Image (cartoon, grey):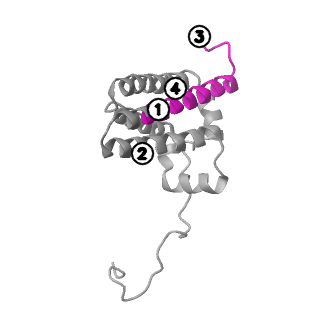
Amino acid sequence: MLDQFDDTQILNGIRAGNIVMYILVIICSIVFMITANWYLAILDGCFTMAFSLLLIGIEAGVLPPPFIEKLRNDMGFLFRPLGRLLFVIFIAFMLFGFGTFGIVVAVLLIAQAIFNVYVIKTHPGVLETYSSAVLLDQAEAPPADDGAYSAPYEPGQPGADL
């Protein structure tokens, strides 16, 4: 079915499909926050929208490179195929609590994630192209911690001798 397309066309299709689904997740979250009349609905919707906006930024390549490097260091699972799959399934599980529209979007999101896995398994060149553009290679380790976020060591500080 996909043999007539080259890897870059398949990659562009995957990216476009992912972005459309993440926008649909944002719309679902907004609808849920408007229709539900309790504060946890707003909190859940905000978290789901933040996760979706982060994934849109990674897919579209609009995030600044220093921010991407910090994300790779702190949340490296977003840049690996299995980690991204599990994160998308986590978002889908959150959507199951968003009513009927949320269930429909969650099922579509899971189906799309399974389709992405199928495409990556049947066309390994797509994963190589995707890895070089967005994801880390599976053999590549996350960047080493340069100590930029670590607290300074001070003798006598509680826990400093551990």
Kindly indicate the quadrant of the structure image that contains residue 127. Answer: top right
Tag 4: residue type? Asn
Q: Nearer the viewer, mark 2 or mark 4?
A: 2
Residue at mark 2: 47
Tell which tag, 4 or 1, sits nearer the viewer.
1
Q: Residue sitting at 38 percent across and 28 percent down? A: 102
* Span shown in magenta: 2-30
User: Which amino acid is tagged 1?
Assistant: Val
Kindly indicate whether the residue at mark 1 contacts the one at mark 4 (C-beta within 8 angstroms): no
Q: Secondary structure at mark 4?
A: helix
Q: Which residue is mark 1?
A: 25
The residue labelled by disc 3 is: 1
Q: Is residue 53 left or right of residue 92?
A: right
Task: Classify mark 1: helix, strand or loop.
Answer: helix
Task: Looking at the image, tell me whether mark 3 or mark 4 is earlier in sequence order.
Answer: 3
Q: Earlier in the sequence, mark 4 or mark 1?
A: 1
In the displayed structure, does residue 53 sit left or right of residue 98? right
CA–CA distance between discs 3 and 1? 28 Å
Q: Quadrant of residue 46?
A: top left
- Residue 116 got which mark? 4
Q: CA distance from mark 3 to mark 4?
A: 14 Å
The x and y percentages for residue 13 are: 63, 24
